[in-house]
Image: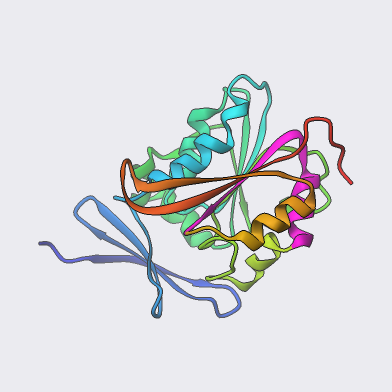
Amino acid sequence: MKPWIELGTANIPNDGGILTLRQRDQEFSISLSGPRGELMNSRRFHSEQQLSVLGCAHLKNHENARVVVGGMGMGYTLAAALDALPPSAEVIVADLIPEVVEWNRGPLGACAGRPLDDSRVVVHIGDVGELLVNHNGSYDAVLLDVDNGPEGLTHSDNNWLYSIEGTSSIYNSLTPGGVLAVWSAGPDTMYVSRLKKAGFQVEVKTVRERPGKGARHAIFMAKKNSRAISR
């Protein structure tokens, strides 16, 4: 078996650790320094795709849909969102770490079909929360895959997204009938309670990391009432 080749590293802000991108043949891996180890692998991405498939299902024929994707990752969530949306859509992808975006513009981009080349994509370098605060009724869907789920594992500021304050801000940022979809390594009953407290109708889907096999992940599907107004 061929050895892994290191292609690049990136520091996570606020001493969150170091990300490392590696390649072995056509396989790519992004890992976090320390005991957490591998975060993403180009052979296991089905659940990330399902995040977009489920989160954008209501927008198939929605003209001028606006969608936020939190977390560039390996590009699979963004690519699946683009596949699910009409030509008139705009997709804003946010990532805190500029190197991750550059990796996706480089050799890593081929994995997901180079979604950053799509003219519908706008890149935001910075915290996805910046796109959600005081943007009432701006988005038709918000797709979050910024960490291991409703816990800021790699970046403590991510905790705000899952707090009642952050969840309420996301609720307000959505149009009536808009959807928040959140990827998680597993279920979280406390997070479901916060989503409901913010006003969402909530359903939790279980998806596999590969079609029909592999680890089971959770996708929190939170829908804003179609008659709701932002508070």
The image position of residue 75, as x and y in percent, is 45, 46
Residue at 83% over, 30% down: 227
The quarter holding residue 207 reads: top left
The image position of residue 128, as x and y in percent, is 66, 55
Q: In front: 226, or 20?
A: 226
Residue at 53% over, 60% down: 98
The quarter holding residue 175 reads: top right
Q: Can residue 116 be seen in the rendering of this structure?
A: no
Magenta stretch: includes residue 171: yes
On the rendered structure, is 218 left or right of 193?
left
Which image quarter is the N terminus in? bottom left
Residue at 72% over, 63% down: 163
Residue at 65% over, 63% down: 190
The image position of residue 33, as x and y in percent, is 40, 77
Q: In front: 167, or 130?
A: 167
Q: Can residue 8 be seen in the rendering of this structure?
A: yes
Q: In front: 22, or 205?
A: 205
- Render colour scheme: rainbow
Q: Which residues are magenta?
A: 164-185
Magenta stretch: includes residue 196: no
| Residue most extreme to the right | 231
